[in-house]
Amino acid sequence: MTDRKAFIYGINGPVVTVKNAPWLMMKEMVFVGEERLIGEVIAIHGDSTIIQVYEETSGVKIGEPVETTGAPMSVTLGPGLIGNIFDGIERPLRTIKDMSGAFISRGLRPDAVDMDKTWEVKITAKQGEEVTACAVIGEIQETSIIVNKVMLPPDVSGTIEEIVSSGSYTCRDTICKVKTADGEIKDVKLVQEWPIRTPRPNLKREPISVPLVTGQRVIDILFPLAKGGTAAIPGGFGTGKTMTQHQLAKWSDADIIIYIGCGERGNEMTQVLEDFSGLTDPKSGQPLMNRTLLIANTSNMPVAAREASIYTGITLAEYYRDMGYHVAIMADSTSRWAEALREISGRLEEMPAEEGFPAYLPSRLSEFYERAGYVKTLNGNEGSVTLIGAVSPQGGDFSEPVTQNTKRFTRCFWGLDKSLAYARHYPAINWLTSYSEYTDDLAPWYNENVSEGFLPARNEIVRILREESSLMDIVKLIGADVLPEDQKLVLEIARVIRIGILQQNAYHMNDTYVPLSKQFMMIKVVLYLYEKCRKLVAEESIPVSLIRESGIFETVIKIKYDIENDKLEKFDDIFEKIDELEF
């Protein structure tokens, strides 16, 4: 940091103007006012520099100093992040609570990680070794689930001049000295800094080929998401965006979950913290927080920090991706983030575009979603960042700018339906308006790891649901009684699919999470029942009403509760009951 100071010329909410400070750079982090509030340079016009302040500016006066740091807005990356809770600019909220109580005082800048905590470091590199950028030189057991791999920064490579032996070290200790190609000696510690708006580099992007298995049938069967992919969950108030993301965070097979509460209500974030703290990770049996990182930026926190929160989250995700982990980010919600953009843009007096959002809304959204991907890292590992962004369109209007622009940059769209939610059908994902462009990319994986019959069965399920939708237009006009029996059967089987497969109970031990093997057996049973009933209707002229009286449809609907996830042999009994149907 230098001693050069500018002075505040104008204040407009979180936007501060200074004059005659030519040394300030775009995207540079600065300290604003006597309380040294954290800010970032966002525009330079002639002799005026515009600063976005990430803390409450009430009480700040004209003439107070602005200090330069000479560095961009960055986050600290190192051991101790997992299991912690941060605000939008990576200040640990638990530490702040100890410092200032229930409310965040201004000007606090606690370290993101405990710099004095001792970690047991297992050194894996040797003196004299040639190392590339992001090379792993040691390991730390960060939690009972996650091993933190001590890496060189992405901009450091060369020959190891000195390295410590395995032992106990703090984040302040230098554990390695690297001589670069130009002869400079770089000190490497357990922590490193990285600018939040600059993507961490990788060796190359790998093609999408592995699904993110969520255990939620409507997603895994109809609209799968790939590791390294992007998905949007739009829906009006009360349709279950947050609860759907909770289920994905709890049950998806990502190694690490980063949950960003961006502008959401404080009580929702409180529920997230309470829920996650009491949950057990189904894969390891350890507490779920041992592989979860939370960023809480509620609606009553400074609006500028909300804008930064998603960049903070994605940078943390890329750090763990570079270690070879598969990271899933839940951003809830990007609409609140876009509203922060709109508010700051208005204070900057920029020309508004549609619905008052700034004209650069699409480019900002693309910058965020393009940082997802399945990559080969600089150190040769494979890792991924999967982005799942909730969108909260006002009045559930999917034609508004944030939803429409999000659809441009995501390949998976889970549209939540108000009528389904009000009918207690959860997840309330509408199977007619939603889509996934990953299905064909994932076909080889499904053929190898589930069954070659999985995707054909899935396509038949989709066909039946679409046929039901067409038939319902007729039913609304003239009623179901006039339909021929084969079409009545389609409606009945579609009902079995909707209630027995697409509807899921998050509070039932057999239904909250369902492995792909059971999901495949469930759709096989439904299609087997459809074929059997079709023969009865076509060859023996048995009416659907008589088949319904046998109770077989209700039996198939209840298999999601009656058959445990690890006892798939019980499906044989269901197939036998279907075979025994006689009239």
Image (cartoon, rainbow, N blue to C red):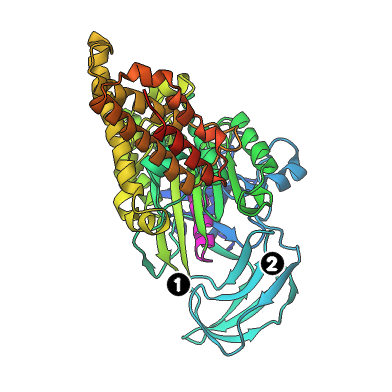
Kindly report the distance in space between the C-alpha atoms of the residues bearing marks 1 and 2.
23 Å
Stretch of the chain drawn in magenta: 310-324
Q: Label 1 is placed on what type of residue?
A: Leu
Above or below, 110 against 260 in this view is below
Above or below, 416 against 291 in this view is above
Does residue 277 appear in this view? yes
Q: Residue at x 50, y 65 (%)?
A: 322
| Numbered disc 1: secondary structure | loop
* Label 1 neighbour load within 10 Å: few <14, some 14-19, many 20+: some
* Image coords of residue 303 (percent x, y): 52, 36
* Label 2 neighbour load within 10 Å: few <14, some 14-19, many 20+: many
Number of labelled discs?
2
Judged left or right of residue 323, residue 233 is left
Residue lying furthest top in this view?
Answer: 478
Judged left or right of residue 419, residue 258 is right
Nearer the viewer's eye, disc 1 or disc 2? 1
- Residue that mark 1 sits on: 378
